Amino acid sequence: MSTSFAVETHRLRDHVNRLEAEHPPLDPASVDYTVRRPALVLERFGRVLDYMARAELEVERNAQELNILLPHPPEIDRYFYAEVWQPQEAMHGVILDELQVRLGSRPAQANLDTVSVKVKVLGAIAHLEPVQDVIRMLYYLTGMTTERSALLAYHRLHDGLVEMGERAAADTIITPIRRQEPGHYAYYRMSADALWQQLTSWQRWLVQRLRSVSFAPVAANSPSQLADVGDMMVQLGINDSNEAVEFAEQTSRVERDLLWAQEKGMRVPPYIAKSFSDALVLSQQRS
Ligand SMILES: [Fe+2]
Ligand SMILES: [Fe+2]
């Protein structure tokens, strides 16, 4: 084990210990579900709540997928995703889903246990050590874009609710949830920075290729679910392709700087820009 690797592991462990101590899963008893104008909140943000609730609830399946994709994870990864990340996110999902049901919506249609073919295929080769590092890199990259886009979404949702005078939901639901996301992002970022430095050039090449062909926003595993992402974007005020690309850029700066440092002038990885732009188009076509 190299010194820098040992130092990095130590730093990550401190970080996760702190997250666990300072951010226990939210207590449902601390939530005030009072909404002054439920129909209006549903009309303005119903698609956001439904998508975010589903994405958060599906961490249960994501954790199973990680068990398949990372058969021998570094202990720090397992500790992070099984004992800190998953319980926090699952509670975000429970609370958001409860909110949308109280507003008169149906509960989120979350896929909690059906693992995709994509995951099974990768899982079949995941036990090979050089491949394992490639998959672990993809996990960190996915984590970064997911956490960034969630944070941006919660930010806009919070401001929208405050603007509508819905302080209870903004202050006792969205604020506490969004406070827990930056720590997740930081974990993936530290891990990605460290691992990228250790990858050989063919591993880096493979990460770039696999990421380019497999990128999708979280919880978007079909055209209809990608349209759901588009619906959410529209309700958050991301209405045209320029804004979609800007949103994509905000979710993926670190990925661009790590993976595509050689590509001078690249503003946003093209597969990420395309995916969020497609989401918007699919949403517009459906409506
Ligand atoms: Fe979350
Ligand atoms: Fe998170």
Image: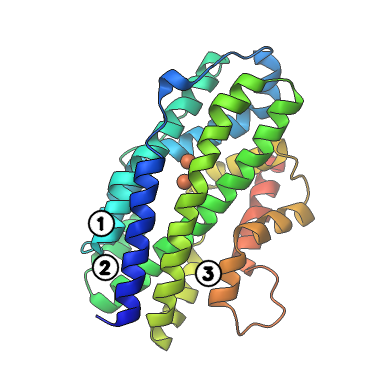
Closest to the observer, 122 or 182: 182
Q: Which residue is label 2 attached to? A: 126
Circle 1: residue type: Ile
Percent x, y of residue 234: 71, 40
Circle 2: element type: loop
Disc 1 to disc 2, how far (Cα)? 8 Å
Circle 2: residue type: Ala
Label 1 CA crowd tier, 10 Å (few <14, some 14–19, many 20+): some
Percent x, y of residue 282: 66, 46
Whether residue 107 can be seen here: no
**Does residue 104 appear left or right of residue 110 in this picture?**
right
Disc 1 to disc 3, how far (Cα)? 21 Å
* CB atoms of marks 1 and 3 within 8 Å: no
Q: Which residue is label 3 attached to? A: 212
Circle 3: element type: helix
Circle 3: residue type: Ser
Label 3 CA crowd tier, 10 Å (few <14, some 14–19, many 20+): some
Disc on the earlier residue, 2 or 3: 2
For the C terminus, the quadrant is: top right
* CB atoms of marks 1 and 2 within 8 Å: yes
Q: Is mark 1 within 8 Å of ligand 2?
A: no
Residue that appears at 68% across and 54% down: 247
Disc on the earlier residue, 1 or 2: 1
Residue that appears at 34% across and 55% down: 117
The answer to which quarter of the image holds residue 161 is top right
Residue that appears at 36% across and 71% down: 8
Q: Is residue 70 above or below residue 81?
A: below
For the N terminus, the quadrant is: bottom left
Q: Which residue is label 1 attached to? A: 68
**Does residue 20 appear left or right of residue 227 in this picture?**
left
